[in-house]
Amino acid sequence: MSKSSNGVLLVVEDDAGLQRQLKWFFDEYQVVFAGDKASAIKQLRRYTPDVVVLDLGLPPHPNDVDVGLETLTELVGLSPGVKVIVVTGNNDREAAVKAIGLGAYDFYLKPFEDEILKLIVNRAFRVRELERENERLLSIGQSAVFEGIIGTSEAINSVNRLVEKVAPVDANVLILGESGTGKELVARAVHNLSGRRGEPFVAINCAAIPETLLESELFGYEKGAFTGAVRQTPGKIERADGGTLFLDEIGDLPQPLQAKLLRFIQERTIERVGGREEIVVDIRLVCATHRNLRELIKTGEFREDLYYRLSEVVIDIPPLRERHGDAILLAKYFLQKYSHEYKKKIGGFSKEAIQSIEAYPWPGNVRELENKIKRAVIMSDSGIIDAEDLELDRGKIDLPFNLREVRANAERTAILRALAYTDRNIARAAEVLGISRPTLYDLMKKLNITTD
C-alpha cells in the first residue's frame, strides 16, 4: 500500500532535526511539513491532510502559544474535519486545554515519547476514516435506526433500550414527553426496528388539522360524501396498511373521533366517510402526546378505555435538561449538519459557548437547541461559534437538598460533561477533571457510567 493511500499527515514544527525524526517515525503516512503559520495554511490547502501535529510554539514567538492557537483556529476553520493534535510544553497544560476548546482533537505534552505520539496519531486517522465512512453512508441515503436520537446519558440510553425491546412486538405504543424532545424520532425508531420497516410509516398531527377535516384525513371519504368530495380518497389509516400509523398529539383528538378510533383498534376495520363498506386494515399504532392523559381522563376530555388500548407500552422521553452531557453532543451534531448544509467552515464552539449550552435549561428541548445552532451557523462570520452567537440566558436549575444526592449528581454531571467534551476519551476526561484515570474508572463504575 502506498504512503499516500494511508493518509496525509501535516507536521507544523520549525525544528529541522525534529522534522527528520518524525518523517522517519511516521513513514507509513505521506508526511508534509510546515515551519510557521503561513506555510501551515498553504500546506493545508495544497494537501488537505486528515491529521495535523501542531507545535503551539511557532515563530516569530516560539515561547508564546498565541501564534499556535491562531494557527489552530484557522486550520479548523478551513477544514472542520481535520484532526489537529497540539503539542506543547509539559508546564503549559492550560494552553492544551484551551486548544481543545478551540477545536483541537487531542494534545500531547513534551518531551516526545514516539510510541505514545504514534498511538494518538494512528487513532486520529482511524477516527477520521470512520467519519468519512459515515459521511459516505449519509450521502447515499443510508439512515440509522436511531437517526437523530443522539446522546450518551443514562436517561436517553434507557429510552433506546426500551425501543429495542418493544419494536419487534406488535403492541400499541404511547410516547410521552415535552414538546421538542423528539417523539416522532422515537416513533420512527420503533418502526425501523420492527418487522414492518419496509412498509409505510404514516404520521399525522391531531392538533394541526381542524376537527371538521380530521375525520376524513384519518378514515378517508367516498365520492360525494360532502361538498368538494369529487373522488374516492383513502385516509391515513388505509395508507399505512402493512406499516405503522403515528398519531402525534393524540391528547388533542376530539371525543367523537376517540370513539371511532377505539372501534378501529378493537375491530381493525374502518368505514370511509360517506361509505358503508368495512375495510380491513393491518397497522402498528404508535401515538404521542405532551399532555397528561390521566388528568384529561379525570376532566372527561379523554376516554379511559382508549387510553388503556393505546398504552400497552409507554415510552417516556426525558427533557433535555435531565440528559446530562447530551446537550453538547447534540450541539456538535447540529453544528456539523448545518455547517455542511450552508457550506460554512466552522470548526467548533468556544469554551464560553460550551458553558452557555450546559448552563441553559432548554425549555424547548432538542428542537430549541437545533434552532439556536442553526441560527448561529447562519449568522456566524468566523470559524468558531461563541456564546454571543447562541443568544442564551443562563437558566435556573433546581437541585435536591440531600447532601449525598447533591454530591452524586454533581459527580455524575461533571463526568458526563468531561466525557462529552473530550468525545469520550478517558485519558483526556481525567485530565480535564484533574484526577487520575484509575480514579475516574472507579467513579464511573460507582455511578454506573459507561462510554458506550
Image (cartoon, rainbow, N blue to C red):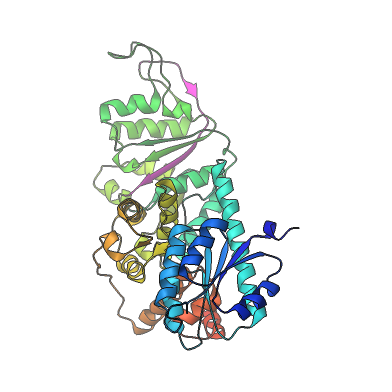
For the N terminus, the image quarter is: bottom right
Q: Is residue 291 visible?
A: yes
Q: In this view, does 25 lie above or below 388?
A: below
Q: Can residue 102 be seen in this view?
A: no
Relative depth, front residue between 323 and 216:
323
Relative depth, front residue between 399 and 324:
324
Residue 340 % position (x, y): 44, 49
Q: In this view, does 288 lie above or below 406?
A: above
Residue 219 % position (x, y): 39, 25
Residue at the right extreme, as displayed:
1
As drawn, is 85 to the left or to the right of 30? left
- Residue 295 falls inside the magenta stretch: no
For the C terminus, the image quarter is: bottom right
As drawn, is 201 to the left or to the right of 301? right
Relative depth, front residue between 65 and 327:
65
Region rendered in magenta? 274-290
Q: Is residue 121 above or below residue 197?
A: below
Residue 334 % position (x, y): 41, 54
Q: Is residue 42 above or below residue 104?
A: above
As drawn, is 34 to the left or to the right of 2? left
- Residue 282 falls inside the magenta stretch: yes
Residue 14 % position (x, y): 54, 76
Relative depth, front residue between 344 and 412:
344
